[in-house]
Amino acid sequence: MRGTAPILLVTTDRPLREALARELTADGYPVAPALSARDARSLARLEPPELVLIGPLEIPGDSTALVREIRTRAASDGCWADAVPVIVLGSEAGAIEALRAFDAGADDFLAAPHPYLELRARLEALLRRSSGRMSHRMLRVGSLLLDLQARRASVSGRSLELCRIEFELLARLASDPERAFTRGELLLEIWGYPPGTATRTLDTHACRLRQKLDAASAGPWLPGVRGVGYRLI
């Protein structure tokens, strides 16, 4: 797979949606198809997308409205990240439609008939450019989203109320979610304890963090690795 997060494909144009989903999947991109802005919002809450691809929708202007929503609600809505790339697929080769998309905050616009090879090239260029600006701010692991600058965390769109240490522990584990971090390295990196320190503080914070994660989603999260330490998933 090209990435762990999906490309959110939003359009009521069934032939276009099915064709693009087929081509993108064949090229190794996970795809989450949506038929409306409402569906897109629900899917994004479940798993924040790597890129949003918006095609023609049933009501004229809905595509532009969705772009504007992504850009204006990103700071307050857990399902949208403000740096997520957005490509609009126009229904016609019109400069006005492209201008409206860019004014709303789209990163790119491709007019019909949407040649796939050109779309893929633009999509890959956007993902390359966005990877740096998003990686220093956001961490995504399935339905878990961490905003490292704002120090906010959410699961499936539900905010997590974490203390400073809990957030730092979660961020460290999320940086490599399938890796088993040793107790010694976590105690050193987060608390500054030297190797060999006898303390239960890691276990206490890990227990509280696990309870908050499991209460907010369908877990399980934070399994202990016997004789080693902890991993996120």
Image (spheres, rainbow, N blue to C red):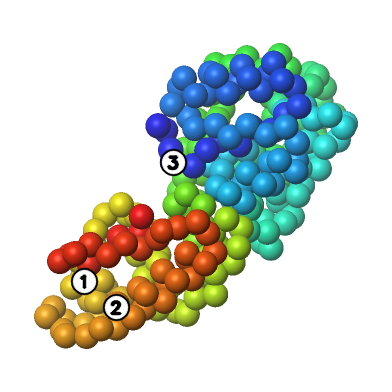
* Mark 3 to mark 1 CA distance (whole Å): 27 Å
Q: What residue type is labelled 3?
A: Thr
Q: Where is residue 132 in the image (x, y as percent from the top left)?
A: 45, 48
Tell me the element at label 2: helix
Which circle's residue, 3 or 1, is located before the other in the chain?
3
Q: Quadrant of residue 32?
A: top right
Q: In which quarter of the image is the N terminus?
A: top left
Write the residue at 57% across / 55% down. 156
Q: Do the residues labelled 3 and 1 touch (CB within 8 Å)?
A: no
Q: Residue 202 carries which label?
A: 2
Q: Do the residues labelled 1 and 2 touch (CB within 8 Å)?
A: yes
Q: 224 or 73: nearer the eye?
A: 224
Q: Residue 4 carries which label?
A: 3
Q: Quadrant of residue 181?
A: bottom left
- Residues packed near mark 3 inside 10 Å, few (<14), some (14 to 19) or many (20 plus): some
- Residues packed near mark 1 inside 10 Å, few (<14), some (14 to 19) or many (20 plus): some
Q: Are marks 2 and 3 in contact (CB under 8 Å)?
A: no
Q: Which amino acid does label 2 sit on?
A: Leu
Which circle's residue, 1 or 2, is located before the other in the chain?
1
